[in-house]
Amino acid sequence: MPAFSGSFFGRITAQTAMSLTDQPNHDMSLAQVTGTQKSPDENWNNATVAYWAVTDLSGGQGTQRGYYDNVHPDGDRDFGTFEGQVSISGGVMTVEGTWKATDGTGKYKGVTANGTFRTRALSPTEVECSWQGAYELAAAKAAR
């Protein structure tokens, strides 16, 4: 499978949060983030990404899980899941974890892809993300 990497700057376009009463400093949130992928791999460059994340924090540590959807310039899509560990240091939230494609449309139908990512909050409404991994399109699998 070819290796690839990329990054995007994202804006939080919707968010809701609540403090839980089961223990001190326990918060959960749901956020939607959108941005444009930048990648040296033309299959992913300029795809519009949206992701939806559920974050569970207790005392500045926690988890984040969610779903992503890349809409490529030709209209085809790839989508999948992610999960990571959250930490807050110096008031900055960072998430490091793994992602995996679950399927797609058009040339991304049947895609196999997975890798790692790192996001960092730049402000209450902005994040930056870098990612890397490997993928194989179904057409390449079928040609083997």
Image (cartoon, rainbow, N blue to C red):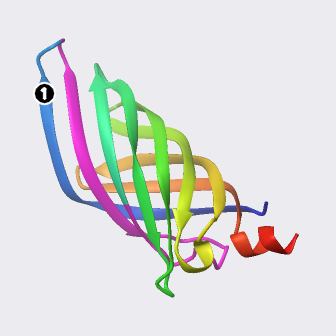
Q: Is residue 91 visible?
A: no
Write the residue at 47% across / 49% down.
Answer: 81
Residue beneath disc 1: 19
Location of residue 138 with respect to 134 vertically, above or below: below
When asked about the image quadrant of residue 56, the answer is top left
Secondary element type, mark 1: strand
Of all residues, the one furthest to the top in this rendering is: 23
Give the amino acid at mark 1. Ser
Instruction: Judge from the rendering whether residue 141 lies leftward or rightward of residue 129; answer left or right.
Output: right
Task: Determine the residue positioned at 49% across, 75% down.
Answer: 47
Q: Quadrant of residue 92?
A: top left
Q: Going by the image, does 64 lie left or right of 115?
A: left
Front residue of this view, candidates 122 and 113: 113
What range of the chain is rendered magenta? 23-50
Taking depth in this image into account, of 140 and 46 the one nearest to the observer is 140
Q: Name the quadrant of the C terminus.
A: bottom right
Crowding at dot 1, Cα within 10 Å, few <14 / some 14-19 / many 20+, comes out as some
Find residue 67 and report its horizontal and vertical position in percent: 40, 52
Quadrant housing residue 111? bottom right
Estimate the x, y position of residue 94 in percent, counting from the top left: 42, 39
x then y, percent, for residue 106: 56, 80
Residue 43 is inside the magenta segment: yes
* Residue in front for this viewpoint, 34 or 137: 137
Q: How many marks?
A: 1
Name of the residue lying farthest toward the right: 144
Quadrant of the rendering where the N terminus is positioned: bottom right
Residue shown at 78%/63% (left/top)? Answer: 2
Q: Residue furthest front?
A: 142
